[in-house]
Image (spheres, rainbow, N blue to C red):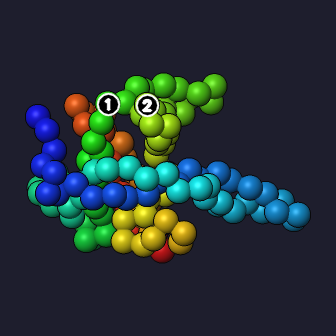
Amino acid sequence: MKLKRNRLKTYYHKVKSTKKDKEGGTYEVYGAAVSFSGEMWPAAGKIQAEMYGDRLSYIRNVRINGKYVITTDRDGQVHYVYPSGLDIMESDGLCLYVSASEEPDYKIISAKPYSFLRLEAEKRK
C-alpha cells in the first residue's frame, strides 16, 4: 500500500530533551527540526473516542512515508529510525501547523509500528 502523493505534506520533528536549571527544576528543550513527508488527519472513530474522550478534538494522526528500523537505547526507550536520519520517540515534538523555527505545536503520545509508522499526536498547551 502506498500513500497518495496529493495528501503528502512536509512536517517537522523535534527531539525532546529534559534539562535541569540551577535550582534543580526540570524543563523541556526541543532540538533542531528535521523534515519528513507524511499525511495527517484528525482523530476519529469509536476506538479513539473511547481512548481519548474529551481530548479527541486535540488529537491528530500522522502517517510517515518510508521504511524504518525499530531500535532501543540503553534506557529501554523505543526509537523508530529512518535512513534519512529521522529518529522518532514518543513524547517528541511535531510541527504540524507551525513553521520549523517555532516551538512544536504537537507532542507524540503514541507510535504504532505498522507498515507505515503511524503516530498519534496531541496539541501542546
Residue 83's disc is 2
In-image side of 45 versus 84 (left or right): left
Q: What residue type is labelled 1?
A: Lys
Can you tell which quarter of the image residue 46 is in?
Answer: bottom left
Q: Residue 42 carries which label?
A: none
Quarter of the image for the N terminus: give it.
top left
Residue density around tag 1, few if under 14, some if 14–19, many if 20 or more, within 10 Å: few
* Residue at point 54%, 69% (across, down): 101
Name which residue lies at 21% across and 64% down.
42
Q: Where is residue 53 in the image (x, y as percent from the top left)?
A: 25, 64
**Could you say whether the residue bearing mark 1 is in a helix, strand or loop?**
loop
Q: Residue type at mark 2?
A: Pro
Q: What is the x, y in percent for residue 36? A: 38, 49
Asked whether 59 or 66 is in front, the reply is: 66
Q: Where is residue 21 in the image (x, y as percent from the top left)?
A: 82, 63
Q: Is mark 2 on a helix, strand or loop?
A: loop
Q: Do the residues labelled 1 and 2 touch (CB within 8 Å)?
A: yes
Q: Label 1 belongs to which residue?
A: 67
Give whichever of discs 1 and 2 has the lower sequence position: 1
| Residue 51: % across, % down | 26, 54
Whether residue 52 can be seen here = no
